[in-house]
Image: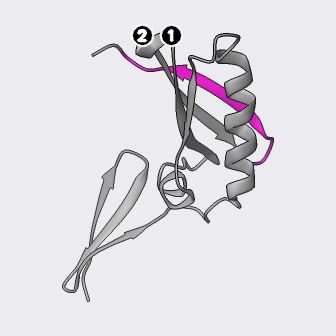
Amino acid sequence: MSAAVLESHHLLCWVDIDGWSVGRDMADPDLTEEQIAAAMARADRRVCLGSGRGFALPYRLEDALMSCTPQGRCMVGWIVSRGGRESWDVWLEVNTGLVKRIPQAKA
């Protein structure tokens, strides 16, 4: 059986005669719902200060796992604050627990 390998972003996808199947070039990191909740709470404390105008929006575990890089970093959610004028992607380095906020580009 022949398979064509397509590289898209950080995932490797294999296409065979049965259709599409998604594979990874590394073992999935041991990411849990608890780690996602803790990372979002930590990021929320840094961004949503005071007025309660910040919203932490975690991703489902399945979605976060699909965003993981080969280095073990996963996008676990996003945060909106200041009435929607500012927003950040929240990334978690699974092995170390490091949480990083990356500003989203303005549309």
The relative height of residue 101 versus residue 68 in the rendered view (above or below) is: above
**Identity of the residue drawn at 33% across and 53% down:** 7
User: Where is mark 2, residue-wise?
Assistant: 85
- Asked if residue 90 lies left or right of residue 10, the reply is right
Amino acid carrying mark 2 in the image = Arg
Residue type for callout 1: Arg
Q: Nearer the viewer, residue 19 or 84?
A: 84
Q: From which residue to which does the magenta span run?
A: 95-105
Using the image as rendered, state which of residue 12 and residue 92 is in the foreground: 92
* Occupied quadrant, residue 9: top left
Q: Are marks 1 and 2 in contact (CB under 8 Å)?
A: yes
Q: Secondary structure at mark 2?
A: loop
As displayed, is residue 40 above or below residue 51?
below
Q: Residues within 10 Å of mark 2 (few under 14, many from 20)?
A: few
Question: Could you say which is closer to the camera, residue 41 or residue 97?
Answer: 41
Q: Residue pushed farthest front?
A: 51
Left/right of residue 82 with respect to residue 92 in the rendered view: left
Question: Which color mode does the image show?
Answer: one colour
Q: Which residue is mark 1?
A: 82
**Is residue 97 inside the magenta stretch?**
yes
Image disc number at residue 96: none
